[in-house]
Amino acid sequence: MSWQLTLDHLFDLARGAALLGSGGGGDPYVGRLMVERALREGARVTVWDLDEVPDEALVVPTAMMGAPTVMVEKIPSGGEGVHALRTLERHLGREATATMPIECGGINSTMPLVVAARTGKPVVDADGMGRAFPELQMETFHVLGVSGSPMAIANEQGDVVLVTAHDNRAMEWLARGVTVRMGGASLIAEYAMDGATARRVSIPGTLSLGIRVGRAIREARERHRDPIEGLAEALQPSGYGPPRILFEGKVEDVLRRTTGGFVRGSARIRPFAPGPALSISFQNEHLIAELDGQVLALVPDLICVLEAESAEPVTTEGLRYGQRVRVIAITPPTIMRTPAALEVFGPGAFGLPHAYAAVAEVA
């Protein structure tokens, strides 16, 4: 059933999207402000359930591409996503029926809403990652055989580049180079598909899940409950596993660098009581959490860093010395844990020498 996005949804969505981003996907704060401005100026954003999308519809996902650290300073003007979409429409010779997130984490939960507000198109309540990943082929769309190109890449200067590649990995490589030339961040339109295909290859309900997760954390705080309990209740009907607390402590070191269109680095978190520190490595998103040589959680499980008291999610670019945090892990839906999916965005895809085991299965 379709529904209207309202201002009341936005703060909860930003919080939930930051959590589902597993540390990455870009800070949703900027995207929230852009959607808020459009709604206050009278725009309407209609959200379609995935099963409502007509077979013959043309669905064109839109997103931000690049290093989240860049987007903190290189703030989009708001028109880049529309420019990318319109360019791709002209190339295809057909107008898009709807847009959709490529990932449900961070700023990429909100950027399609900006496009929807500016164009009057509905946005589909679904995505292709169920979290955030750093590369364009790391999507269920790709795993299930959809071509990502032709794609359009736009920047704030009005420049736009069309990419047609022989496969989705080549598309990622070419588009990453263009994005670096555009200053490290761009807006894209890609993975154009019909409605029947969108229903087959997408993870349903992730936009509304972000709102529900963000609301659950907020309401738990307001009622003086443990936010982790509220989060568990919100995730229960979603296909995701319950949150598991991996570690609590204080951030004592962060190594972070922006290179090649990504933010890469690691964080070390010291426990409150004497004991070994937790190490987290990331490439835009958190990839692995290790304690004294033992792997506690591993991609594609969501590894999320939360402020210890408020459970407010902390992005990789927001990690800093002295933060008191909780680290949790969440197992994603089954579609993201098949052998074919793990080949694309499992540990081996990031060069990690570990076999995947769902966090719920780790002793």
Image (spheres, grey):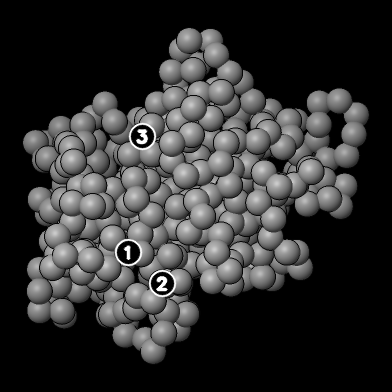
In the image, which disc is placed on residue 211? 3
Left or right: 245, with 225 as reference point: right
At 14% across and 60% down in the image, what residue appears? 54
At 64% across and 25% down in the image, what residue appears? 308
Q: For residue 350, what is the image quadrant?
A: bottom right
At 44% across and 76% down in the image, what residue appears? 172
- 216 is higher (above) or lower (below) than 262: above
Instruction: Decide if residue 256 is in sight here.
Output: no
In the image, which disc is placed on residue 200? 1
Q: Label 1 is placed on what type of residue?
A: Arg
- 304 is higher (above) or lower (below) than 161: above
Of marks 3 and 2, the one in the foreground: 2
In which quadrant is the N terminus drawn? top left
Rounded to the nearest whole Å, what is the CA distance between mark 1 and mark 2? 8 Å
* For marks 1 and 3 on the same chain, the one whose residue lies earlier in the sequence: 1
Q: Label 2 is placed on what type of residue?
A: Leu
Q: Mark 2 points at which residue?
A: 144
Disc 1 to disc 2: CB gap under 8 Å:
yes
Task: State the image coordinates of residue 13 (x, y, percent, origin top left).
Answer: 36, 36
In which quadrant is the C terminus drawn? top right
Q: For residue 165, what is the image quadrant?
A: bottom left
> Which SS class for mark 1?
helix
* For marks 1 and 2 on the same chain, the one whose residue lies earlier in the sequence: 2
Of marks 1 and 3, the one in the foreground: 1
Task: State the image coordinates of residue 168 (x, y, percent, origin top left).
Answer: 42, 79
